[in-house]
Amino acid sequence: MTYDPEDTSKGDEYRHPDGTREVVFALADGRVLTVKEYPDDESFDDGVADATYVGVEDDIADLPDASSFEVDGAEE
């Protein structure tokens, strides 16, 4: 499946050739927020090589660890 901006919706997942996974997290006002998972540190370094680091987003950094969202007794 190829990218189609008209059909983009929350939860759409994309797999990049380098092993990176990207999932659409939210859509609002023509903007798309995604979450990317890189397969390793080197891929992350390559992926952000041309970006400008602007510091820590405190609202995200203050979120609890993912394990706190697990449901007791839920099967994986």
Image (cartoon, helix red, strand yellow):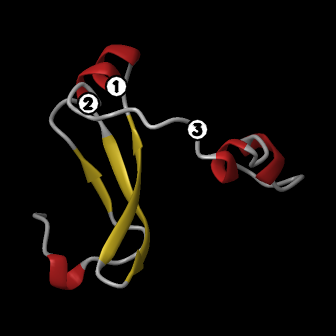
Residue found farthest to the right: 72
Disc 2 marks which residue? 47
Number of marks drawn: 3
Mark 2 and 1 residues: CB-CB less than 8 Å, in contact? Answer: yes
The crowding category of the residue bearing disc 1, from other C-alpha atoms within 10 Å (few below 14, some 14 to 19, many at least 20), is some
Quadrant in which residue 29 is drawn: bottom left
How many angstroms separate mark 3 from mark 2 (CA)?
18 Å
Tag 1: amino acid: Phe
In the picture of the structure, the residue carrying the numbered disc 1 is 44
Q: Is residue 72 above or below residue 32?
A: above
Type of the residue with mark 2:
Gly
The residue depicted at 32 percent of the width and 74 percent of the height is 31
Q: Residues within 10 Å of mark 2 (few under 14, many from 20)?
A: few
Crowding near the residue tagged with mark 3, few <14, some 14–19, many ≥20 C-alpha atoms within 10 Å? few
Instruction: Identify the secondary structure beneath mark 3.
Output: loop
Q: Position of residue 26 (x, y in %)?
A: 45, 72
SS class of the residue under badge 2? helix
